[in-house]
Amino acid sequence: MEQTLRGFVAGLSSSEPSPGGGGASALIGALGAALCLMAANLTSGKKKYEQFQADIEDIISRASESAQKLTELIGEDAKAFAPLAAAYTLPRDKAEREQILEEALKGACRVPMEILRESARIAEIAEELAQKGSKLVISDVGIAAVSSRAAAQGAAMNVYINTKMMKNRDYAGKLNAEAESVLSGAVSRCEKIREQITNELQN
């Protein structure tokens, strides 16, 4: 949380397992949320968009919450990975290893699922801004949409890599199904926004 951007990139590029893809996905999602927040702030108070003022104020509140949450999840992802990394180092003949590993895998899915859900919320906000936000910052809303799509897809992959290793296939299947449902909605929404905004900018 307190690193410079340069420091975070250096840590991400090192041989250490964290920060990793989960933290990167959360950061990408947070940037998408921040872009929505910027677009909403630049729309707020403008006479041309006064009919949407109440909606824009609600968007500012929601986007601010998501930006804060996703920023926190950058660090939370690294913390959630630590028990899993420790579980993998346990001797294979240790009686409790399988149970410990299973619980660690479940724990490692928690943060990516949160990142995925928040990214989907940003997609919803971007969709609303594409209709109600200032056209002067419409490209930023489009970038927010493609950012939230990337964050959602990255977070989903981090769910799948952990569920793949689970012994409890029923539990893994339920998590996969939930992740796929949230992801599908977010990707569809983001692609629609991207196409709409690209068309507006090109014509």
Image: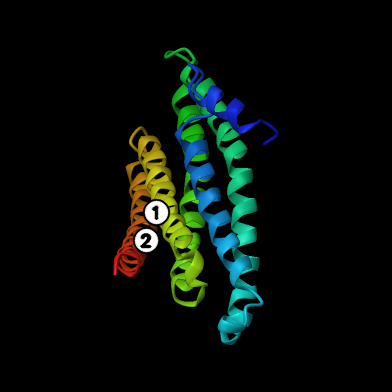
Q: Is residue 147 left or right of residue 4?
A: left
- The residue singled out by tag 2 in the image is 190
| Crowding near the residue tagged with mark 1, few <14, some 14–19, many ≥20 C-alpha atoms within 10 Å | many
What residue appears at the point 58 percent right and 54 percent down from the top-left corner?
34
Q: How many angstroms separate mark 1 from mark 2 (CA)?
A: 6 Å
Q: Which of marks 2 and 1 precedes in the sequence?
A: 1
Relative to residue 158, is residue 137 drawn left or right? Answer: right
Q: Position of residue 187 (x, y in %)?
A: 34, 58
The numbered disc on residue 53 is none
The C terminus, quarter of image: bottom left
Question: Which residue is depicted at the point 42% across and 14% down?
Answer: 92
Which residue position holds label 1?
Answer: 146
Residue at image coords 67%, 36%: 1
**Label 2 secondary element:** helix
**Above or below: residue 147 compared with residue 27:** below
Instruction: Report whether residue 16 is seen.
Output: yes
- Picture quarter containing residue 41? bottom right
Which quadrant of the structure image shows residue 161?
Answer: top left
Q: Residues within 10 Å of mark 2 (few under 14, many from 20)?
A: many
Residues marked 1 and 2 touching at CB (< 8 Å): yes
Q: Position of residue 87 (x, y in %)?
A: 50, 22
Q: Amino acid at mark 1?
A: Val
Q: Is residue 12 left or right of residue 171?
A: right
- What amino acid type is highlighted by mark number 2? Cys
* Secondary structure state at the residue bearing disc 1: helix
Which residue: 46% across, 51% down? Answer: 116
Q: Position of residue 94 (x, y in %)?
A: 48, 15
Q: Return the residue nearer the eye: 177 or 22.
A: 22
